Amino acid sequence: MSHLTDVCQEIITNLYCKLFSGEGGGSLKDPRYLFLLYVASRCHKEAAETPVIIANQEQLTRKYKPARDLLFSMY
C-alpha cells in the first residue's frame, strides 16, 4: 500500500510541476508555488535548486535585486 501511495504522490507532483512551469501551453506560474510543492512533497533537493535556478535567470537579465529578494524570501 505504501508503494502505491508513493507512486500516486509522484504522479501528482509531476502534474503540478508541469502546471506551474507552463508546460503544455499554459502560462508560467509564480515559482514560489513550485518551491512550496517540492517542500510539501519532501523533495528537498529540488526545493533547494528551484530558487537558485530562478535567481540565476534573473541575474542573466541584470535584475540583481529581484534575484536577491527571491533567494531571501524562499529561505
Image: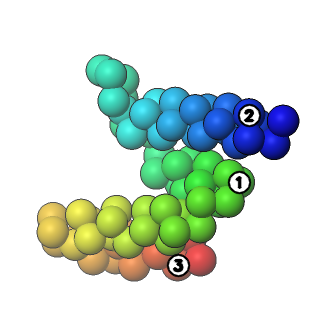
Q: Residue at x 39, y 78 (%)?
A: 68
Give residue 50's position: percent from left, percent from top.
43, 62
Residue occupied by mark 1: 40
Instruction: Locate residue 35 relative to residue 40 in the image: left or right.
Output: left
Q: What is the CA distance from the residue labelled 2 to the residue labelled 3?
A: 36 Å
Which callout, 1 or 3, points at the residue further toward the start of the chain? Answer: 1
* Closest to the observer, 19 or 68: 19
Q: What is the CA distance from the residue labelled 1 to the residue labelled 3?
A: 19 Å
Q: Residue at x 33, y 30 (%)?
A: 23
Task: Identify whether 9 is placed above or below 23.
Answer: below
Q: Secondary structure at mark 2?
A: helix
Q: Nearer the viewer, mark 1 or mark 3?
A: 1
Query: To which quarter of the image does residue 36 belong?
Result: bottom right
Residue 72, disc = 3
Q: How packed is label 3: few (under 14 Cα within 10 Å), some, or many (20 or more)?
A: few
Which callout, 2 or 1, points at the residue further toward the start of the chain? Answer: 2
* Closest to the observer, 27 or 10: 10
Q: Determine if residue 4 is in view.
A: yes
Tag 3: residue type? Answer: Phe
Q: Determine if residue 69 is in view.
A: no
Q: Secondary structure at mark 1?
A: helix
Instruction: Locate residue 24 relative to residue 15 in the image: left or right.
Output: left
Split into 4 quadrants, where in the image is the C terminus? bottom right
Query: To which quarter of the image does residue 56 belong?
Result: bottom left
Residue occupied by mark 2: 4
Q: Nearer the viewer, mark 2 or mark 3?
A: 2
Which callout, 2 or 3, points at the residue further toward the start of the chain? Answer: 2
